[in-house]
Structure formats: structure tokens, C-alpha cells
Amino acid sequence: MRLKQIPDLIKKSVTAWLVDYAPSMGAAIAYYTLFAITPLLIIAIAVAGFFFGHEAAQGEIIGQIRNLIGHEGAIAAFGKWLNSLFSGWEVFLFALDLSISFAITTLLFALIYKLMPRAKIPWQDVWIGAAVTAFLFAIGKFLIGLYLGKVSVASGFGAAGSLVILLLWVYFGAQIFLFGAEFTWVYSNTYGSRAAQHKRSEG
């Protein structure tokens, strides 16, 4: 595949993404997530608040949301642990942290795109689609994590804002996941290992 073919690949992927109603599907996922997670958060805050106080319970739950979405996840914590052991290697460890996170995310998307669809897509095409999806996913995670890092946990607006951001992240994540699936399919059939077979079937 040549660089000048990338715009055409993106255009076809976006078209397929729109034709298959991915925006509506992502909105539905976020909508049902809101109704599923809100009662759980209310119950969790009420129960924990009974023992530890409302503010402390609310702050802890919002902190867990920040850990899940933002830059304080388990992989980042592993990177900080390494940084404490190898002082002066910050740049190397930061790159290692990003590489491990990207590799794990790519692997997860590759397994999903390979095993879940009814259509069989070769591994070499799956890896490319999974890597693109993981890259877009990392950008969204970084931006939302950056916002959550500036939210005041103690304020009522901060708590409500974190729930809204979580909802937006589910919507964004769903859109990235669905776009990645369309991208993988389009790439495989247009420029990947299935391109010749796809052209023969159309001819």
C-alpha cells in the first residue's frame, strides 16, 4: 500500500462507518451504559458514605473512574514503580510505558477483530487495523485523562462532570472500536490480502 492511497482508505472507512450506522450504535451503547452505571454509582456512594462519609466515598469513586480512564491506570502505575527503581531513566521508562500499553491494547483489539466477526480476516490485515484502532484509542484516553486531571474531586460539579466524561468516553470508545472494525474490513478487501479476491467477486 502506498502513502497516496491512505486518504482513499480513510474515506472508504468513514463511508462504511456511516453506512452501518456506527454513530447511532455508539450512542445506544453510551445510553444504556448510563442507565446501567448510574444506579450502581448511587448505591456504591450511599453504602460507602454510610461508613466513611459522603465526600470521602464520592472522592474515592471518582478517583477510581480517573484511574480507569486517565493516566493513572495499572500500566502507568507499573511505569512509576520502575521509575522509582531506576532514577534518571525517565524518558526510557516513559517510552516503555507507552509501548507496553500500546502493545496490550493492540493485542486485545486484534483478538476481537479476528475472533468475533463472522467474516474471516487474515492476521496480517487484523494487526494493521488493531494498531490503528489502538492509536486512536490512546489519543482519546489521553485527552479525557488530561481533563479528569484538572477536575476538582471535592466539588459537586467535578463529580457530575466525571460521570459525564465517563459517558462521553464510552461513546468515544465505541465509535473508535466500530471505526476500527470498518477500517480493518475495508483495508483487507481494498489493499490487504483479500483485495484480489474482492475484485474478482465484484467483477
Image (cartoon, rainbow, N blue to C red):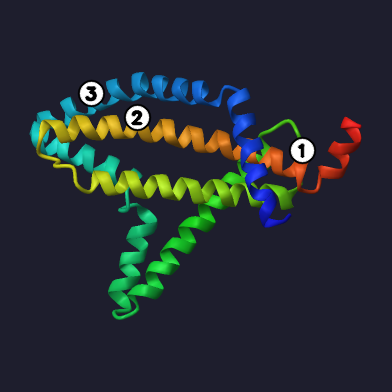
Secondary structure at badge 2 equals: helix
Secondary structure at badge 1 equals: loop
Position of residue 150 in the picture relative to residue 133 (left or right): left
Q: Earlier in the sequence, mark 1 or mark 2?
A: 1
Position of residue 33 in the picture relative to residue 151 (left or right): right
Residue 69 percent coordinates (x, y): 34, 44
Position of residue 11 in the picture relative to residue 143 (left or right): right
Secondary structure at badge 3 equals: helix
Q: Which kind of residue does numbered mark 2 sit on? A: Leu
| Residue that numbered label 1 is attached to | 120
| Residue that numbered label 3 is attached to | 43
| Residue situated furthest front in the rendering | 4
What crowding class fits label 3: few (fewer than 14 Cα within 10 Å), some (14-19), or many (20 or more)?
A: few
Q: Which kind of residue does numbered mark 3 sit on? A: Ile
Q: Quadrant of residue 8?
A: top right
Q: Quadrant of residue 90?
A: bottom left
Query: Which residue occupies 31% across, 76% down?
Result: 85
Relative to 184, does residue 15 appear above or below in the rendering? above
What crowding class fits label 2: few (fewer than 14 Cα within 10 Å), some (14-19), or many (20 or more)?
A: many
| Residue that numbered label 2 is attached to | 167
* Front: mark 3 or 2: 2
Residue 27 percent coordinates (x, y): 44, 23
Kindly report the distance in space between the C-alpha atoms of the residues bearing marks 3 and 2. 18 Å
Q: Earlier in the sequence, mark 3 or mark 1?
A: 3
Q: Quadrant of residue 96?
A: bottom left
Query: Which residue occupies 46% across, 20% down?
Result: 28
